[in-house]
């Protein structure tokens, strides 16, 4: 199976891009997108790493073009295992951004033998200290809430781009061109998506960081929300086999706005495994 296809999971069909390498013995890469994007967040990485190993990215429920057949309780973690099982991927390196990073950590704690490595990009977290927003971040967050309350999709989309793509300390529109167009398209699909049902929460991650067995690299951009730096630094200190990379001049989605530098960092991590 290659390129675009659909994977059936209980109550939904999830679109995915699978580029299967015919002869590589390296662990596949499974890319898990952020909560304001879809699988296309990783299109540059899929193209770059398909030459050396099998690569996979898919849309989770509530994102991209995922089709909900039955709304009700579901688990993103069980969906991940169903996707990997359906594509005969027994073990993989998980690359996750934001909410995708949280899912990657949940998977590594749930079934350690199936995770050969973790490359976490400003990962979301459960069970830890509540994020403390700066004054600017609070204002931008309030702009998003106000736009959503007014049912102004275009305004909501731009407000989300200002916070997550441009970064809270940067002028709105800092990231332009194709990267911005793609973000706005992915984010609009997320805003328009039908509600998939109630997500079943996995056990909290923060109290269990010391139990992560997979080699891990935590990466974040220096233009991201301020609370990510201390959170990520704490993760590097607590995960037994973890390292750090800080990308300069980028915010929450470095794989989108600075693909060459991001790919180099990921390639370096993979070479260390």
Image (cartoon, rainbow, N blue to C red):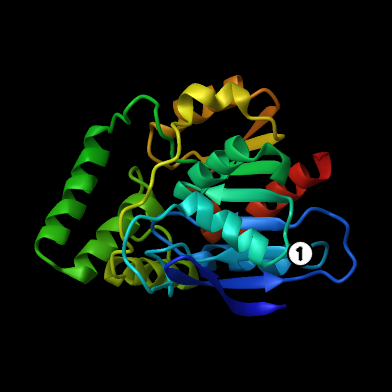
Position above or below: 47 against 250: below
Q: Is residue 136 above or below residue 130?
A: below
Q: Give x and y (percent) for residue 82.
A: 58, 60
In the rendered image, residue 33, in percent from the top left (x then y), is placed at 51, 57
Image position of 143 (left or right of 160): left
Q: Which residue is drawn at 75% across and 57% down?
A: 28
Query: Is residue 78 shown to the viewer in this render?
Result: yes
Q: Which residue is drawn at 59% across and 20% down?
A: 237
Alpha-carbon neighbours of circle 1 within 10 Å: few (<14), some, or many (≥20)? many
Q: In which quarter of the image is the N terminus?
A: bottom right
Q: How many marks?
A: 1
Q: Which residue is drawn at 65% across and 42% down?
A: 118
Task: Tell me if I can see residue 172 in this picture.
Answer: no
Horizontal side, residue 56 vs residue 129: left or right:
right
- Give SS at disc 1: loop
Query: What residue do we see at 36% from left, 48% from top?
Result: 170
Q: Name the residue carrying label 1.
A: 54
């Amino acid at each position: 199976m290659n390129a675009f296809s659909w994977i059936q999971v209980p109550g939904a069909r999830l679109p995915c891009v699978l580029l299967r390498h015919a002869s590589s013995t390296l662990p596949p890469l499974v890319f898990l997108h952020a909560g304001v994007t879809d699988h296309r967040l990783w299109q540059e990485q899929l193209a770059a790493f398909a030459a050396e190993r099998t690569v996979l990215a898919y849309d989770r429920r509530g994102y991209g073009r995922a089709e909900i057949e039955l709304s009700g309780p579901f688990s993103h973690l069980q969906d991940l295992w169903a996707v990997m099982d359906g594509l005969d991927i027994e073990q993989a390196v998980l690359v996750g951004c934001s909410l995708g990073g949280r899912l990657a950590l949940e998977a590594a704690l749930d079934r350690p033998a199936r995770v050969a490595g973790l490359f976490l990009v400003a990962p979301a977290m459960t069970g830890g200290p509540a994020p403390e927003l700066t004054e600017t971040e609070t204002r931008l967050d309030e702009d998003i809430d106000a736009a959503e309350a007014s049912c102004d999709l275009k305004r909501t989309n731009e407000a989300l781009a200002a916070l997550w793509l441009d970064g809270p300390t940067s002028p709105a529109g800092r990231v332009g061109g194709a990267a911005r167009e793609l973000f706005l398209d992915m984010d609009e699909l997320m805003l328009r998506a039908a509600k998939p049902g109630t997500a079943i929460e996995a056990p909290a991650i923060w109290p269990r960081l010391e139990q992560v067995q997979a080699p891990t690299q935590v990466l974040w951009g220096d233009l991201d929300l301020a609370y990510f730096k201390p959170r990520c630094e704490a993760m590097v200190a607590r995960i037994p086999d973890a390292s750090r990379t800080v990308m300069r001049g980028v915010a929450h989605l470095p794989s989108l706005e600075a693909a060459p530098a991001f790919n180099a960092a990921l390639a370096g991590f993979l070479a260390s495994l």
